[in-house]
Each structure stands twice: as structure tokens, then as C-alpha cells.
Image (tube, rainbow, N blue to C red):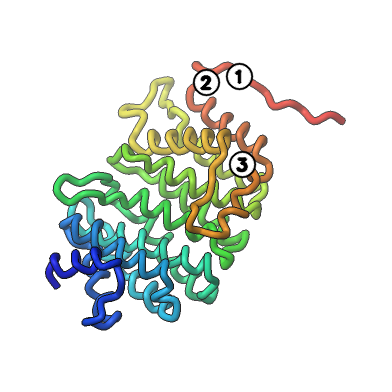
Amino acid sequence: MSEAYWQSVMQAGMEVPADRSLDECTVELVEMLGHPNPRWREDIAYPLLTTWITKGVYDELLSGLGDGIVPGLRYGLGHDGDLSVLRRSYSALMLAEIIGRDNNEHLMTSDSVLAWGDSATAWYVREQDHRGWVPEQGWANAIAHGADLLAALARSRHFGRLELTVLLDVIADRVLTPTSYIWRHGEEDRLAYAVMTLLHRNALDAGIVEPWLARLGAGIQVPRTRGHIEAEWPSPSVRNTSSLLRALHLQLALGVQGRADLRADAELFAEQPAHRADLILAVLDQIRAESPWLYRPTTRAKPVT
């Protein structure tokens, strides 16, 4: 259909058109998620699908909708610098909305959501195109949209201690994997928020989280060969990892809040994560170790015996 047709749908309250079937509309809108024109992708397809999900239009069809979105994560995977990233990125963002609906309404089985989680994490660690803003095409933002998807999965009742641990590992894999891109559009904040969502579940104790932080810290320490710093340091992945640690420290220190449209977030984010004070110190240990020449050494207070 023409852009004018879809604009008329937007202007008429974003209701499902009466002259076309929901299935026909959905197929076309899902295809538009990869459209190179941001007006079609960002101003029509994404807001319409999100509105219909929120209104419950797909509640009886949510499993099929998610299954139809997932192949978009694999579309052109491995390519870098072309337009295929738009389909992958907006498929991730849409899947996050679908999982968010299940988080609110408890509509899905564990098998479906866990399968989506497998597809999401497999895509995220393999995504090569880290561009944020693309001239003429608008936002690609695969790293940020993937972080939103991980945060949606982190909220899911279908994800227990094991699955949440896997999400942590996926985040570490993502930031430590070499890339030519330095994140410039708040990707580290969105990833840190996904980590905070995991921590607010209070299913992961310090024995899991602190070694994970140490893994990130090891990735940003200056390597030396025969006493000399290796060339091209810090690399983009080191910068991104360092930025994530700093963003996580700030979010732990200030606290974060949930989304107003997710009812369970009010309870999930009502209190600070367990072991917050210890986690702040653990993050600071990694940040300090990155530049030991700069920061004053500190030691953690020993417990009174």
C-alpha cells in the first residue's frame, strides 16, 4: 500500500484497517521494518505494530507474530555497512515489544520465549554492523536495540538463574568481541541498563557477577610486550568495554527505574539490587585497574570478626 494509505491509518487512531485483514497488514508492516526509508520503518511500521501489540490485538497470535519476526534477526547476518542491518535491528526491537507484552500479560509458554532468547543471543554476538545513525536511512542502532531485547528477556518469568547467567555472558561476549566501531549513541547506557535489569532480578549472586566483571576488566587492561604498550591501544572494543563499566557504575550509584508501560517494573525496580554496595566496589576495582597510574589504590574494608 502507499505511504498515504498508512498515514491515513496513523491519523485515524492507529486502529487496524477495516478494509484489509490483520494478517495482510501484519505481513506488510513486518516487511517495512527493513525499509531504507525511515518514514516507512520508524514512523509507520514500528509504531503501528507496537500499538497493536500494546492494545492486545495480537494476544491470541503472539506466538506466531514472534516466530514471524525472528527470521529477521538472521537476514544478512555477517554483513557490515549495507542496509540489511535495518531488518535485523528493527526485528530485535519488535521482538522486545512482543516479549514485553508477554511479561505484562503472561500469554506465552516457556518453550517459545526460550527459543526466541536463543535466536536473539545468537544474533547479538554475531552482529557486525554497529552503526548508530546512518545518513539518509536514519537509525540502524543494532547494538542499542539488541540491548533492549536482552533487557526484555531479563524481565521474563521464563528466565531463571541459568538463563540470566547466559545473558550476562552474551553481554560480555558482545563488548569484548573485536570491532572497528566505537559506540557513540548511548549503546553502553542501554547495555548497562540490561545488566541492571538482570541484577534487579536478584537471582545472580556476587559469585557470578564479580567474575563476570573481572572478565570485562581483563579486557581493558593494557597489554604489554617486552615492556612496551602494543600499537593501536585502546582498540574500539576496549573503549566500548570501558564505557560499559563506567555506565554500569553510574547506574548502580544513582539507581535506575523501570518502564511506565511495564506493570511488573514497579515491583522489579522498587528496591536496589541485592549486594549493590559490593557490586559498586567490584566495578570500581575494574575501572581502577584500567589506569592504575591514575587512581589512588583502595582496599575493601575487611569484615569485623
Q: Is residue 17 above or below residue 182?
A: below
Q: CA distance from mark 1 to mark 3?
A: 19 Å
The answer to whether 55 is drawn above or below residue 199 in the figure is below
**Whole-Å distance between the Cαs marked 2 and 3?**
19 Å
Q: Are marks 2 and 3 in contact (CB under 8 Å)?
A: no
Q: Residue furthest right?
A: 305
Quarter the N terminus occupies: bottom left
Q: Position of residue 243 (x, y in %)?
A: 42, 34
Position in image of residue 66 (x %, y %): 39, 72
In the rendered image, residue 120, in percent from the top left (x then y), is placed at: 41, 62
Q: Secondary structure at mark 1?
A: loop
> For residue 201, what is the image quadrant?
bottom right
In the image, residue 40 above or below residue 129:
below
**Is disc 1 in contact with disc 3, using a CB cutoff of under 8 Å?**
no
Circle nearer the N terminus (2, 3): 3
The residue sitting at 22% across, 52% down in the picture is 80
Q: Which quadrant holds residue 19?
A: bottom left
Lower position in the chain sequence, tag 2 or tag 1: 2
- Quickly name the residue at label 1: 297
Q: Does 4 appear above or below 294?
A: below
Q: Residue 157, which numbered label? A: none
Q: CA distance from mark 2 to mark 1?
A: 8 Å
Q: Secondary structure at mark 3?
A: helix
Q: Is residue 79 left or right of residue 200?
A: left
Q: Which residue is mark 2?
A: 292
Amino acid beneath label 1: Pro
Q: Are marks 2 and 1 in contact (CB under 8 Å)?
A: yes
Tell me the residue at 25%/76% (across/down).
Answer: 17
Q: Residue at x 43, y 73 (%)?
A: 56
**Front-most of 89 and 58?**
58
Look at the numbered disc 2 and give the secondary structure of its residue: loop
